[in-house]
Amino acid sequence: MNQQQKSGNDPIVELIDVGVTKLSPTGQNVVILDRISFAARPGEITGIIGPSGSGKSTLIRLINRLDEPSEGRILLNDENISAIDPLLLRQKVAMVLQKPFMFEGTLLDNLQRPFLFRNLTPPSDESIEITRVLELVQLSTEMLVRDARSLSGGEQQRVNLARALISHPQVLLLDEPTSSLDRPATARLATTLHNICSSEHLAIIVVTHDLYLAEHIVDHLIYLEQGKIMEEGAGTQILAKPQTAAFRSFLTEPDRNKEPSS
Ligand code: ADP
Ligand code: MG
């Protein structure tokens, strides 16, 4: 199918039989991910859940080449990402990490960083670039002068998100974005992600331990265990009717919302 024939809901990202094998400290090959195939579509949130150590972080790190697959292919708009320069790729496929990271300086300084990294003139406080991302993450322009490190955890995570959105990515990867947030801040971030996903027509892939996110905003859910996809489907559907004992037991674990140790 050529580019013109593609419809709006064709996948942006496709993983085809992706495997990752690493060498353990004792020199043995360890399979971290095993024949992973799935697609992420624009305007949809794909959730990846699973126990600690199941390979979730490795999986999303592959999608912006922070890690490389040992087998299989990863396509972005039908192009193998192994042929795309990692820095260019990361503008199209942005990553938001678990703990918000603030550079020294104000909120504005933090939003200007991606431009400075690329030797570009940073946008001013009144520019469309800055006001657009602030509006998307629901932070007021009055906060631009605030010391970024003095903001609350929830606000810092929004700054992280704004910084990722400033280069107009097509795909947003989030690794446990709510693990350091309380329930109200989690709920606010969830609503923001849901709104951004449809307004920006983004494909969002979020790794989470948090069933609140899985239940409230995820369209397509993948349950990963020991590097394998054990269940996959519409979020509400597979949460209501888990098919495997492993997933049922994961859903009833009392410590399921805890931050993973790895
Ligand atoms: P999760 O995010 O689901 O907790 P990870 O993707 O971080 O899982 O890790 C999956 C497994 O891969 C873990 O057993 C971890 O110890 C192992 N692992 C991660 N990175 C490496 C590496 N660079 N070398 C060897 N093993 C690794
Ligand atoms: Mg992880």
Image (cartoon, rainbow, N blue to C red):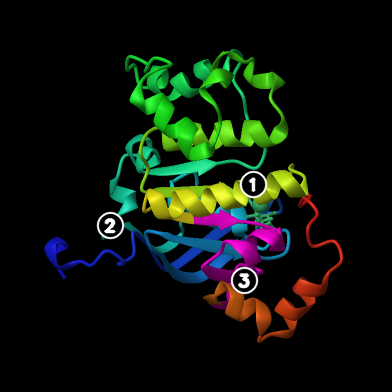
Residue 54 in the image: state x and y as whole percent. Answer: 67, 63
In this rendering, which labeled residue sits more in front, label 3 or label 1? 1
Q: Is residue 222 magenta?
A: yes
Indicate which disc, 3 or 2, sits on the residue closer to the N terminus: 2
| Residue corresponding to mark 3 | 223
- How much space separates mark 3 and mark 1, taking CA atoms? 24 Å
Q: Mark 3: which amino acid?
A: Tyr
Total numbered labels:
3
Quadrant that contains the N terminus: bottom left
* Secondary structure under the numbered disc 2 in the rendered image: loop
Indicate which disc, 3 or 1, sits on the residue closer to the N terminus: 1
Can you say whether 207 is above or below 104 in the image?
A: below
Specify whether 174 is left or right of 256.
Answer: left
Q: Mark 2: which amino acid?
A: Asn
Q: Are marks 1 and 2 in contact (CB under 8 Å)?
A: no
Q: Mark 1: which amino acid?
A: Arg
Indicate which disc, 1 or 2, sits on the residue closer to the N terminus: 2
- How much space separates mark 1 and mark 2, taking CA atoms? 31 Å
Residue 226 in the image: state x and y as whole percent. Answer: 66, 69
| Residue corresponding to mark 1 | 188
Tell me the crowding category of disc 2: few under 14, some 14 to 19, or many 20 or more residues within 10 angstroms, Cα based: some
* Secondary structure under the numbered disc 3 in the rendered image: strand
| Residue corresponding to mark 2 | 77
Q: Which residues are magenta?
A: 205-232
